Every structure is written in C-alpha cells, then in structure tokens.
Image (tube, rainbow, N blue to C red):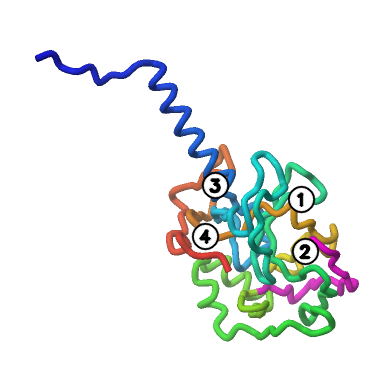
Amino acid sequence: MKRADLRGTWPQALLSLAGALLLILGIRWALFEPYVIPSGSMLPTLLIHDHIFVNKFAYGLRLPFASKYAIRFSEPKRGDVLVFRSVEDNDMFLIKRVVGLPGDEIQLRNDGLYINGVKAPIYAVSSPRDLLKDWTPDTRDEAIAQNEILEETLGDIKHAVFRDKEDPQPESAVIKVPEDHLFMSGDNRDHSADSRMWGTLPIDRVLGRASVIWLSCEEAMAQTNQLCNPQTMRWNRIFKSVR
C-alpha cells in the first residue's frame, strides 16, 4: 500500500502561518498585550523591568486599528492601573493609576490625595520590609531610607504609595476632571510625571488595565531593554496580580 504524503505544500504552509499570525494579532488587538515597565513612577507597585499583560478587553472591544470602542461594557474605576497613549506623544505609552473620575475635583497635597475636598484614607505601612520583600536588600534599604511608605485606599483597592522624605512635590492645583476624562497619578507620588503636569487623560486613549506580571528581572540584556537578563530574574514576582 502506498504511504500518504504528509509533507503538505507551500500554499498549505503559508496558509497555516498566516492563520497563526492572524490569531496572535487578534489576541493582541482584542484581549491581551505585553508591556514592559520603563521607569520608577509606579514604585513600589511596579518595578522597572516588570513585564506585564494589559487586559484590553477590560472595558470593551475596540474597532480594529482604531481608538474607538465597538462595544463598551464598563468604565475605568478609581484605583485601576491603566496603560494608555500619552497625551503629549502619540507614539508613547505610559502606565499610571486612576485617582480621579469624571466630575471629580482632585488635589494632591503633601499629606495625601484629596477627592472633592475629602482626603483619601492613607496610613503608614507597619512592615515596609515585608512589603518590599521582592526587592534586593540594597535597593530595599535605600527605598526605606528615602521614602515614607504608605497604604492608600481608593474604592475597594488598597495599594502602596511612596512619598519622598527629602524632596516632596509642591501641592498641585485643584483640577476638575472633565467628562470622558480621568486624572492619573503614579504611586511614586513625588517622582511621577502625571496629570499634575500634562492634564487629564481622555478615556479613549486608554489601552487597557494592567492585569498580571508574567516576567520580572533586575536588568535587561545589554542589547535591548525588552529582554530580561536571565541571571537577574525576580522569580517571586512572576504571576503576581497588579493592584
């Protein structure tokens, strides 16, 4: 009996490759997209060289290659950590936390965040070393020496905040958040270029909500800032949810 030829043809191979690429692009367009944390503005929640997945389906389904939503089924909540397109540079993506919703009056003072004139609950962290257990000893000790480490409550989300002991930012003006906009802030409050500097964020510039850390390292490979140096992996941060 003649054996069947299982090698396939070039058209079949190309069709299979095209199908795989379309699947990957479809997942990135509609569901999840990777993002690498480039700076310390979200310390201590997110570290430089944390690799995260962004949930692009958290608030709706966008039209392909567009910022508009085809279907919108929820809105960003106070406390959500979002990746979004910069209002100053359309090719740059940033990550910050939602602290102000449409209609809110927001002010960041030296003693905390004020929403409509009421201070958000904030308390000193009792065990900063436990909170920063993912850090190397040297960077942890330096962070504790330089910063007040606080826990802030936004809605049902409790998250850590850094406040610089030596060089706090001046109090911001009171900013009224317009309709379809958000007030964004970094958790590293005195070292974050956010809505205090560039204004409120139009909601249609939001890419999605940060969901989980899938890779983390102290250093990237010398040739690129996108690939982790395997000798500097932070294994205990992998699969940690972002809150």
Q: Is residue 229 left or right of residue 128?
A: left
The residue sitting at 57% across, 55% down in the picture is 55
Relative height, residue 73 to residue 229 (above, below) = below
Sequence-wise, the earlier of marks 3 and 2 is 2
Circle nearer the viewer, 3 or 4:
4
Asked if the residue at tag 1 contacts the one at tag 2, i.e. Cβ–Cβ closer than 8 Å, the answer is no
Mark 1 element type: loop
Circle nearer the viewer, 2 or 4:
2
Percent x, y of residue 118: 80, 85
Asked if the residue at tag 4 contacts the one at tag 2, i.e. Cβ–Cβ closer than 8 Å, the answer is no
Mark 1 closeness class: few <14, some 14–19, many ≥20 residues within 10 Å: some
Residue on which disc 3 sits: 220
Numbered badge on residue 236: none
Magenta residue span? 161-180
Residue on which disc 2 sits: 182
Give the CA separation, mark 1 to mark 3. 24 Å
Q: Is residue 219 left or right of residue 114?
A: left
Sequence-wise, the earlier of marks 1 and 4 is 1
Total number of numbered discs in the rendering? 4
Question: Which quarter of the rendered picture does the N terminus lie within?
Answer: top left
Numbered badge on residue 212: 4
Relative height, residue 242 to residue 86 (above, below) = below
Mark 3 closeness class: few <14, some 14–19, many ≥20 residues within 10 Å: some
Relative height, residue 219 to residue 193 (above, below) = above
Asked if the residue at tag 2 contacts the one at tag 3, i.e. Cβ–Cβ closer than 8 Å, the answer is no
- Which one is in front, 29 or 165? 29
Circle nearer the viewer, 1 or 3:
1
Mark 4 element type: strand
Asked if the residue at tag 4 contacts the one at tag 1, i.e. Cβ–Cβ closer than 8 Å, the answer is no
- Which one is in front, 212 or 20? 20
Percent x, y of residue 73: 64, 60
